Image (cartoon, helix red, strand yellow):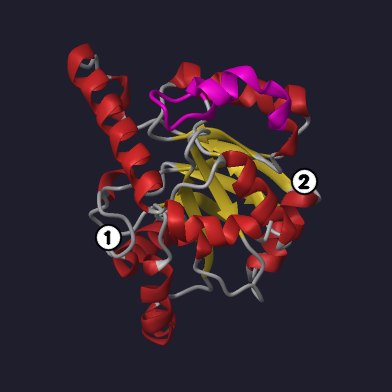
Amino acid sequence: MKIDMHCHTKEGSIDAKVPIEKYIHRLVEHGFDGMLVTDHNSYNGYRKFQEIASKVERELKKPFVVLKGIEYDTRDGGHVIAILPDHVKTTALEIKGMTIAQLERFVHKLGGVIGPAHPFGPGFFAFMNTHFGKNNIDFLNKFDFVEAFNACTKPLANMKAEVMAGILGKPKTAGSDAHKEHIIGKAFTEFNQDIRNNNDLIRAIKEGRMVDAGGQVHDKVLEKKNQLVEKLGVMGYWIYNKSGAWWNSLRLRKIVKRL
């Protein structure tokens, strides 16, 4: 079963351009069987799918599964993909700003799984570029999987992620991380069993049911970029992340107390 494990939708991610309905149709055209919606700190893309699920099912010429995940902005450990079981109904992960240790305890307490998104990518949104990541290598053992290929990340960074997953003995996933239409379908994770819901996906990850994960880095990633612009973008993200964590600190305090 072929799934894109890192997808952003217009309805759920402020920087994404493709509505989830179009996203689904494009993946089907590329031969995919499913997608994991991983909007930034939001389930709105998945909520939109629930509204149009019946319509989409009638339009498609093959079965297609849409799974519910999130790409969470931790305060100190970069972006993390989190997947919770079907029976869990919580909006806590839509409040950005938990530390990565808090996120790990929260998700695992609820029976979910986590993995670092683009762990060697540029900037503070990559676990291995954070102060916490560099000084707490043992924390990698707490991850359930590693995103070993990301279509929006440079080949060397992907290679490092794949090697790290192998050393740790962690299941490898791949995702397009598509925010625009031309990137959709450029990465896949192949499972050796049918996955119809989040519980199936979590079980497959824990059992290491991936048989292949990879894809093609999209062309613009390979282009030489202005270093100053790239650094300003990284700094902008850092300010955005820190200010968001501060703004949400009171709301998060109640959640953290229950961990």
Which residue is depicted at the point 62% across and 47% down?
102
In the depicted structure, whether residue 210 falls above or below residue 156: below
Residue 203 is a magenta residue: no
Which residue is depicted at the point 58% across and 18% down?
134
Between residues 165 and 241, which one lies in front from this camera angle?
241
In the depicted structure, whether residue 63 falls above or below residue 194: below
Residue 135 is a magenta residue: yes
Which residue is depicted at the point 41% across and 74% down?
47
The mark closer to the camera, 1 or 2, is 1
In the picture provided, is 183 more to the left or to the right than 203? left
Q: Which mark is residue 208?
A: 2
Instruction: Tell me how far mark 1 sits from mark 2, CA to CA.
Output: 31 Å
| Residue linked to disc 1 | 10
Q: Quadrant of residue 53?
A: bottom left
Quarter of the image that includes the C terminus: bottom right
- What residue range appears in magenta? 120-140
